[in-house]
Image (cartoon, rainbow, N blue to C red):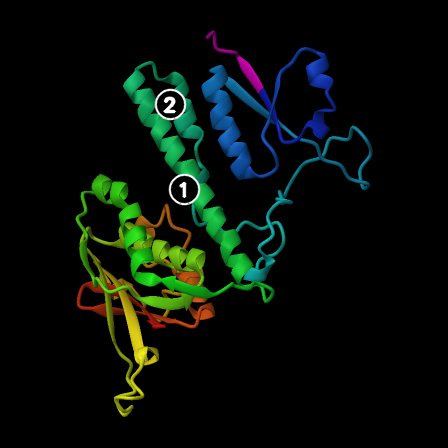
Amino acid sequence: MMPNALALMMALPNESKGLFEQAGVEVHYSGIGKVNAAFKAFEVIQKTGCATLLNLGTAGSSHFDAHSLIEVTQFVQRDMDVSPLGFAVGVTPMDADHPAEIALDGYFQLLRDETDKSAQEHYIDIIQERITSLKDMLEELFMFTKIKNDSFKLELSNCCVSRLLKQTVFSYYEEWKKQGIEPSLDICEDTIFITANVQALRRVFQNVIKNALVHGQKSICIQMKQQDSCNCRASDDERTSKNRIVHILVSNDVKNPDDIDVDKVFERFYKADEARSISSSGLGLSIAKELVERMGGSIEARLEGKRFVVEIQFECE
């Protein structure tokens, strides 16, 4: 394949009205939004081998004359509305916090100039990782916005928490292997049921485990145990399964425990370790807390020496 000097990309066909195609110029359409644009840009570069990628869009205003030359002093993303989080419409709260996540120009330049195939693959891996990380962060942002809305409801049913926890843990097998981590697992063999939403509960487990992977020191322990509730005055007849509580604990070593404020870890955008938060939105534990509480459970964090512990509790069925 002979590389093209220039490739043209736009968000929507309505913006070009087919004029470029009529002139024999191929246009690559990405859809609206910077995540779509990032994925499409990567695809176009790989497909065409272009030296320059031109991303065109349209803009209009009733305040300016047609064909006027206007200096742009502010850019507002029309597809970004996180007003429920306290930000103005069009403001992306993570842009300032995660510049490394969207600063891909240098890697694209290195990829274009590099002739060694192994080095090219290395840069491609980095770009893919950064784009995926950005996509995940935006997805968490939208998720948090969604669950903070008063109209958000969870359909609850009887679900097996023990099986779901094991499935979630094993879904991270490749990540454990990649990071050289052998987690310590102490999950009781009992079949334990709680009232919850399966998708929401899986998301809780994923977020808590991911937090340990990102911020931990390769010593991760995941436990699940069942015990009587604190209502110790209940008679034997009153001690039914409803008096039993399931505890899920995820703990990991931390390098600087003094830097962690356990009273703030569930707050939105809280990050104790900025140096290791490039791939973190600061929303994972906030989402976990909101979902757990909407399912009638509780979640708390604490420090035990140099170990950071997140404990989730639900009443058993």
Q: Which mark is residue 59?
A: none
- The answer to whether residue 248 is above or below residue 205 is below
Residue 97 appearing in the image: yes
Measured from the top left, where is residue 1 in percent x and y?
46, 8
Quadrant location of the C terminus in the rendered image: bottom left
* Residue for point 30% across, 87% down: 231
What span is colored magenta in the figure?
Answer: 1-7
User: Residue most toward the front?
Assistant: 237
Residue 100 drawn above or below residue 57: below
Tag 2, which secondary structure? Answer: helix
Query: In the image, which disc is placed on residue 133?
Result: 1
Where residue 162 sits: x, y (%)? 29, 61
Question: What percent of the width, then of the height, locates residue 308?
Answer: 24, 63
Left or right of residue 178: residue 46: right
Q: Residues within 10 Å of mark 1 (few under 14, many from 20)?
A: some
Query: Amino acid type of disc 2?
Result: Leu
Quote the CA–CA distance across marks 2 and 1.
20 Å
Residue indicated by mark 2: 110
Going from the N terminus, do you reach mark 2 or mark 1 first?
2
**Foreground tag (2 vs 1):** 1
Q: Secondary structure at mark 1?
A: helix
The majority secondary structure of the magenta stretch comes to: loop
Check the image and report above or below for 204 versus 243. above
Residue found at x 52% / y 61% = 147
Q: Amino acid at mark 1?
A: Ser
In this rendering, the answer to whether 215 lies above or below 243 is above
